[in-house]
Amino acid sequence: MEEGVGGAGLVMSSDRFANVVDAEAGDGDFEEERRGENVVLHVGVRDIDDVRNEKRNGIDLEEITRKAIMDVDAQPTMDETILVGDDLMTGPPSPVVPPEIASHVLQGVDLCDGILRNLFLCLQINDIEPFCQDEIALYKQCAERRDKEIRKRLQDSEFKLGSSMPLDEAKGRASQLEAEVTSLERRLILASGVEGIEGFRQRWSLHGRLTDSKNRLQFLKQGLESRKKG
């Protein structure tokens, strides 16, 4: 049996060839030549003598093709990730902004309210998250940028308050934040006994608020300390 190969290095029985022709109809012109039980495809790239010469030189196109197919089959496939509402809780919750500094902290910040409205509208129309993937992804990205900027502004504001507001008021603010931290710590301990998704959401929210309050207190105290250095 001859090693006949067309452009892809293929030798196949006439039955298999018929199947390939059905599948590949219209993909290009070729000329078939019957040799015994096999059909050799010539596509104007190489002929049988080229293949024989390459085999003599240690090049086996059939082996190369077989290995290439095995390599492709061995590549891992990437599963499509479906975003759901709980994916918005993968990071910390949005920070709580005290009303007395809200106008300064939120000035010029993209609050993502337009994107959030689009997400709610999509969920209202489609009812389930898989049909609102773009809206969820856009809001998640926007919310992460927004929260990062707000946290930075909160910390900067607390530092400025600690360094510039009247000393008694600054100390009173520090005491207020310390009491808030203590209260959140206790609530977090109580939430540890709540089971299921509701318990997870409570702990997630309380842990985020506790972390933010501690950071605000830290920067407020740094502002107070800067008075002494000045």
Image: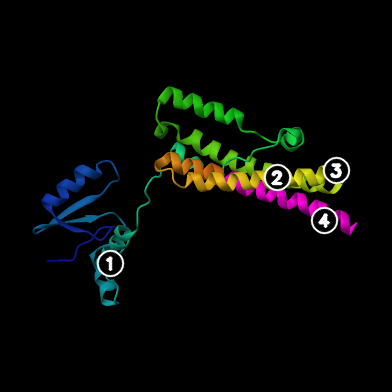
Examine the residues drawn in magenta and state their main secondary structure. Answer: helix
Q: Secondary structure at mark 3?
A: loop
User: Which residue lies at the image location 42% right of the left edge and 33% below the top edge?
Assistant: 129
**Which numbered disc covers residue 61?**
1
The kind of residue tagged 4 is Glu
Dot placed on the residue nearer the N-terminal end, 2 or 1: 1
Q: Are marks 1 and 3 in contact (CB under 8 Å)?
A: no
Placement of the N terminus among the 4 image quadrants: bottom left
Q: Secondary structure at mark 4?
A: helix
**Which numbered disc covers residue 177?**
2
The answer to whether residue 229 is left or right of residue 116 is right
Dot placed on the residue nearer the N-terminal end, 1 or 3: 1
Nearest to viewer (mark 2 / mark 3) = 2
The kind of residue tagged 3 is Met
Judge by depth and name the residue closer to the eye, 107 or 41: 107
Q: Can see residue 92?
A: no
Percent position of residue 13, x then y = 12, 55
Q: Are marks 4 and 3 in contact (CB under 8 Å)?
A: no
Percent position of residue 80, x then y = 38, 45
- Residue furthest to the left in view is 36
The kind of residue tagged 2 is Leu
Query: Residue under circle 4?
Result: 225
State the extent of the magenta-drawn residues as a range.
Answer: 208-230
User: Which residue lies at the image location 59% right of the left edge and 39% below the top edge?
Assistant: 143
